[in-house]
Amino acid sequence: MSLTPKQIRFVDEYLVDFNASRAAVAAGFSSKSAKVQGSRLLTNVNVRRLVERHQEATSKRLRITRDDVIKGLVVAAEQARLNKDPTSMIAAMSEVSKMMGFYASKPREKTAETDYDSLKRKFELMSDMELRALVKCS
């Protein structure tokens, strides 16, 4: 995996708040083209892999899983409901919905890479129990 210093800086900045435009500017790209550059960088296979590696390392270091985050957000939404705080409840459930993939993404042209990424995401969304059941069926 060969990345330029700007691409590596982009990844480091992107991992701060997952804002590709801001990360592109911080990495040294023009603010006029930051939105396009950020989007383009996120489609670069090597950039994407580095982002994923950093995310996995953080997850392992913190010993937190995606399920832990979702469960925490559901608890927060329930607490907000009990506190009669609809804004916080909606914000928490919106985050859960995003993490669960309930928001449809824009259709893209299928490529071998896209098919692989799509399949990978499906497996990532499966629980340990679902994965074990899938392996037992094979």
Image: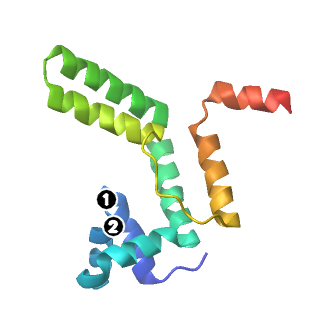
Q: Is residue 127 visible?
A: yes
Q: Which residue is mark 1?
A: 16
Q: Position of residue 71 (x, y in %)?
A: 40, 26
Left-right relation of 29 to 102: left
- Which residue appears farthest toward the right when viewing the image? 138
Above or below for 116 versus 40:
above
Q: Which mark is residue 13?
A: 2
In the image, what residue occupies the spot 25% across and 83% down? 32
Dividing the picture into quadrants, the one containing residue 136 is top right
Classify mark 2: helix, strand or loop: helix
Q: Position of residue 31 (x, y in %)?
A: 24, 81
Q: x%, y% of residue 43?
A: 51, 70
The answer to whether mark 2 and mark 1 are in CB contact below 8 A is: yes
Three-letter amino acid code at the position of disc 2: Glu
Display coloring:
rainbow
Disc ID at residue 42 = none
Between 94 and 15, the one lying in front of the other is 94
Alpha carbon distance from label 2 to label 1: 5 Å
- Rendered residue at 86%/33% (across/down): 138
Looking at numbered disc 1 in the image, what kind of residue is underneath it?
Answer: Val
Where's residue 74, x and y in %? 34, 25
Q: Are there few (<14), some (14-19), or many (20+) residues within 10 Å of tag 1?
A: few
Name the one closer to the observer, 7 or 133. Answer: 133
